Structure formats: structure tokens, C-alpha cells
Image (spheres, rainbow, N blue to C red):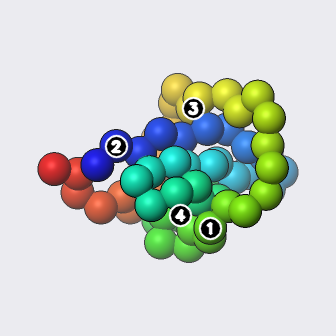
Amino acid sequence: MTIVFYEFTQQPRYWVAHDEDGYWLVPAREQGWHDRLPFVGHATNLIPLIDFDGIDLGLPALS
């Protein structure tokens, strides 16, 4: 499974994630993956996330 993250907002800080199940709004904080919500909005020109700033989102083990 591949997950691609994009920058979304700075205040409060959120990222948009795209995986095989769709798009997710993910709080950019420790264990934020567990509090993700389906992203049903509209966004243009999303910038791919390069650095997680040391944040451990608590992602599931990818195989």
C-alpha cells in the first residue's frame, strides 16, 4: 500500500493523504492518522509533502 501526503492547511495544520481507499484529511500531529477523516472537499494545486517534521502519524505497517 502506498500513501501519498500533501500539504493542506497551516493553522490548524492538516495534511491530505491519498491511499487505495481514497483521500483523507489527517491532523499533522503525533498519532494523527488515527483521527483522520474522509476528505470530501475540493483542493487544487496540492503540494506533495516532503518532510514530516519528525511527526509520527502512527501509520500502519506497510508491507
* Point 52% across, 26% down: residue: 50
- Mark sitting earlier along the chain (3/4): 4
Instruction: State which quadrant residue 60 falls in.
Output: bottom left
Tell me the distance, in whole angstroms, between the alpha carbons under discs 3 and 2.
Answer: 14 Å
- Mark sitting earlier along the chain (3/2): 2
Tell me the distance, in whole angstroms, between the alpha carbons under discs 2 and 4.
Answer: 17 Å
| Residues tagged 2 and 4 counted as in contact (Cβ below 8 A) | no
Label 4 sits on residue:
32
Mark 4 crowdedness (10 Å alpha carbons): few <14, some 14-19, many ≥20 = some
Q: Give the answer, above or below, for where 33 lies relative to 56.
A: below
Q: Amino acid at mark 2?
A: Thr
Label 1 sits on residue:
38
Tell me the distance, in whole angstroms, between the alpha carbons under discs 4 and 1.
Answer: 13 Å
Mark 1 crowdedness (10 Å alpha carbons): few <14, some 14-19, many ≥20 = few
Tag 1 secondary structure: strand
- Mark sitting earlier along the chain (2/1): 2
Mark 3 crowdedness (10 Å alpha carbons): few <14, some 14-19, many ≥20 = some
Label 3 sits on residue:
49
Residue 1 x, y percent position in the rendering: 28, 49
- The answer, for residue 30, to whether it is visible in the render is no
Front residue (pair 47, 19): 19
Q: Give the answer, above or below, for where 54 lies relative to 49.
A: below
Query: Where residue 2 is drawn, which disc sits there?
Result: 2
* Point 23% across, 51% down: residue: 62
